[in-house]
Structures are given as C-alpha cells and as structure tokens.
Image (cartoon, helix red, strand yellow):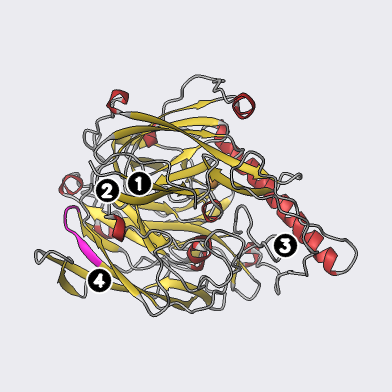
Amino acid sequence: MLSFFAAHDLNVTTSSTRRRFLRLSAAAAAAAAAGGTIAHRSFAHTMAGVPGAKAGGPVPAPEARAPAFPNLDPNTLARFVDPLPLPAVAQAAERRAIPGKPAPRVPYYRVAARAITSKLHRDLPPTTLWSYGGTVPGPMFETQSGEGLLIEWANELPSRHFLPIDHTLHGAEEGVPEGRSVVHLHGGKAPPESDGYPEDWTLPGQSRTYHYPNEQAAALLWYHDHAMGINRLNIYAGLFGLHVIRDGHERALRLPAGKYEIPLVICDRDLSADGQLSYPVSADPARPWVPEVFGELHLVNGKIRPFLDVEPRKYRLRVLNAANGRFYRLSVPPGVMVHQIGTDQGLLPAPVAVAHVLLAPAERADLVIDFTPHKGSRIVLSSDSFELLQFRVSEAAAADPSELPSSLGALARIEESAAVQTRRLTLDESQSPVAESTGMLLNKTRWHMPVTESPRLGSTEIWELVNLTDDTHPIHLHLVRFQILDRRRFDAFQYMTAGTLRYLGPMMAPDANEMGWKDTVRVNAKTVTRIIVPFVGYAGRYVWHCHVLEHEDNEMMRPYDVLPA
Ligand SMILES: [Cu+2]
C-alpha cells in the first residue's frame, strides 16, 4: 500500500479553511453593515508588481446580500437512500460528413444545453439545474479511438443567469449576454475551431457543430462549459458530462467491463433550505466573486450520498473530480483492495495499490476495486470525513472472468533531452491586507495581454511551473497530454524579492499513480513542478489555465498558440 500524497498537498486544506473563515467573516460583516452597526469597507486590491493591475479605490458600503434561506445542513438528509444513477449513453442521430470532407461519414449527435429540474436526494424538492441533454451529468459519449464524431452543441439556455455573475471579471462585463455557453472537451485532441475557445460562445437559440477526431489513446475525457467569465457558474449549474474513448489495447486487457465498469462523477454543492443551488458570494455585491467554493453536500452522478448494489467481484471505477475547487482524497476502509490503473489520459504502465487517491478538480482516476472477499458488506467510499457513496455487496457468489494484469502496457518516459525549450512560468496570487485573495495570474499576465507561449507543432517543451502562492493549483493545457518530470520546493520569498530560484529540497519524482499521461497537474504551493509536453495535434490558438474554476474565471487563464511546423 502506498500513501502517495505529499505533506505539502495539505496546504490545500489549510488555506481553504483560512479562506472559508474569512469569507464567513465577510458575510457576517455585511449583514452587520445592513443593520447599520458596522460600516463595511471593501478591501483595496493589492496587485503590486502585476502589469496592468489597477488598485481598487474605496467603494460604497454594500447592501445586505444575506441568502434568502440558510444553506441546507447535510446532516438533516438521510444517508444512502438513493440508488447511484448511471449516465445514459449518448445516441447518434445519424451519420454525417465532416465539413470539408465528403468521406467518411461519422456519427453525428445533437446535445442541447437547457434548464431542467432534478431531484438530488429522495427527501428534497426538485432543484433547478442547467444540463446537457436533460440530465446532470449529461449523456456519456462512448467512442472509439481513431473514429471521429460530430456533436452539435445547441444552446437552449435561458437568457438570464440564475447564479451571481461578477461583472468586474474579464469577459463578464455588464451587457455581455448572460446565457452564453461554449463546450470544451477536456483532454480531447481537437482542432482549434472545435476546442471551445472561451470567447467563442453561442447565444441561446444558436448552436455550433464540433468535430472530435478522437485520434488519441483510450481515456476518460469530460466535456464542460468554458464560457468566458462565467465558466464557474455554468459548471456549478450542471453543464458537464463524460466522454469515454476505447481502444483495442485496453479491450485486450480483460479489465472489468460492461455493468462492472462504473463512472463516478463527484462534485460538491451548497443548497438553500428549499433545495435550490446556492453559490457563495463575497460581502461586496458589486464584486460577488469568491476565490474558492467548497460545498457542504457531495454528489456522485448527480445524487447526494447514493448507494450502489454490487456483486462480490472486481469492478472498474472511472472517477472524475468535477468540483469547482474542492480536492477529493478518496479512500475506502482498510482491507478493501484498490488499485489505480489509469490517470487523466489513459492507463498506467502497471497497477498501483493505493490507500488514498488525491484528485484535484478535473483530474481523473481509473481504479479497480475488489469486492470478492466482502460478501454481504457495506463499504463506504469517503473523502476524509465526507461520505460519498455506499457499496452494498451482495451475499451470492459471483463469477469474475475479469483480470487485473500485472502489466498494463509499455509507457515510455520522455527524455528531457527531447525538449527544444524550457519555459519558466509563475503562478501568482494577490491578496488584500487581511489575506483575502483578490486574484490569481499565470506568469503575472492577464488574459487580454498578447500571447507569450507559442510552441511549434511537433516540438517538445518543458514547462517549469513556479508556484509562488499558498495553494495547490491544478494546471491544465488544452490540446496536449504531458508527463510530470518532478517537483521541488523552493524559496518563494527569495524568488519574489531577488528573482533567483533557490531550491529548498531534493527533486521529488511524481507519485507512482502519476506516472502515466496527464492533462492536468497539481502544482503544489511554493513548489516548482516540471512537465514535459509534446505539442502534437493541430496548429492554432488554445488556452492553458488553472482548473480551480474561480481562479480560471478571474485571470488565471492564458491563450497560447501552437505555431505551424
Ligand atoms: Cu488556481
């Protein structure tokens, strides 16, 4: 058994607790201000050293913004009363030609984003959500490597948003349509015009057809909204779903399949007492953005704390962390054997026995869990103290022809010498005088500034991500997959004052369950994380960003250009 999360990952928890405290404090201050007892003053922005940053002046005292209902207490909800829903498999409407190519004709799907209501728990009234295809998560695309598909993404959303837009954020200014939406296939090697560029949104009543060539190895991808400045709200509202790619290599391994392969999409939400989505706001109604969101309720495939009946045999669990900002640290009770067999972009070289699985937002884990010795047991999948899902293992013996091979296939590590360039890129945070986050940047550069990263198609680069902040940031690059080289702690104070990099410890190899292809990497606080990236696929404009959605929406995202070879 390996315990493979490093001590510095715990910064996530520490920092989140600090922020939660500060946010609650701010809310209390606002409520008091509404009563006339405390004159609330907004924090001045302090973005010293950040090009293009403006210092925010004093602003008028905010009006009361207390939620109409206090949030629902998760302890009031009965545990494990709803069966785990499984996402429906998307059905192609017909076969169509790819634009500009008469043949071959490929499966064509149409998926509409629209408002729905859904019961998140047996004892709750229906909750208003935004959905792809009528469910949250949306329909699951079952696809084959090398077999492309077309998806017409139709925007049938309401024209007004139901969650708190912050009009001070880039791309979300007053007057920009609130019902905007654009879909990105996370982990997909897609041409730029089908990648879902954040500013390439559609309006309600419009649609756009994207082509996904699927020329990539078997992996669990996911699609989600990526609309500029409101991405965090659209995903919180429910705009996400899974896209599985299969291939012959994976099929030959005889892993648990069919009804023994279970997708698990995990996320957290807050609900008001009447069961409606509650997205937290700052104390300043003119700037409702909050730096992170941590919901009290945990949903798996759209239900709060569901259960799943299983047989005493092996199962394959395809897990996605679809939360806005929460890191999940998954575990089952000791004695239940779990192996990780794959990561974001496919299989590991060999299974890794795991005691915990740490998943940042957007990361995926491919797990094999063995219920064989646990007939008649009830086994809870948890994240620290949060219960997520209960497995109910039947008493009757079950046949299990599936295998957990000792080797999953060769996976060559990329030599550092293959890189033609190393880019040093910082992760930056600015804070108010009371340590409330006011914004995060990549390389001290805002979204609208000219492109600074332009790798050439076909070349390999090392990106050295220098995290000057107190948080772990999951960094995601569109289009490509990469390997993690190493992580190393450094003296952030010296870097910020003198500009020189002084390491404070040895190079740490990636964890055993990070040794596969990745598309999202945890860049730990005060740590340099190096990734090696072959830029293959297509020339054109893409983005890279932090996958804490509140960070992404507030400038922690940059365009990059893949130049023609
Ligand atoms: Cu971040």
Please determine whether, in this image, residue 128 is positioned above or below residue 430: below
Q: Residues within 10 Å of mark 3 (few under 14, many from 20)?
A: many
Q: Judging from the image, what secondary structure is the residue with disc 2 in?
A: loop
The answer to whether mark 3 and mark 2 are in CB contact below 8 A is no
Q: Which residue is mark 3?
A: 284
Q: Which residue is mark 2?
A: 539
Residue 393 lies left or right of residue 146; in this view the side is: right
Whole-Å distance between the Cαs marked 2 and 1?
7 Å
> Mark 3, mark 1: which one is toward the viewer?
1
Residue 229 lies left or right of residue 455; in this view the side is: right
The answer to whether mark 2 and mark 1 are in CB contact below 8 A is yes
Q: Which residues are magenta?
A: 145-150
Residue type, mark 2 in image: Ala
Judge whether residue 296 is colored magenta: no
Task: Pick whichever of labels 1 and 4 is earlier in the sequence.
Answer: 4
The answer to whether mark 3 and mark 4 are in CB contact below 8 A is no
Q: Residue furthest left?
A: 103
Which disc, if any, is residue 561? 1
Q: Residue furthest right?
A: 37
Which disc, if any, is residue 109? 4
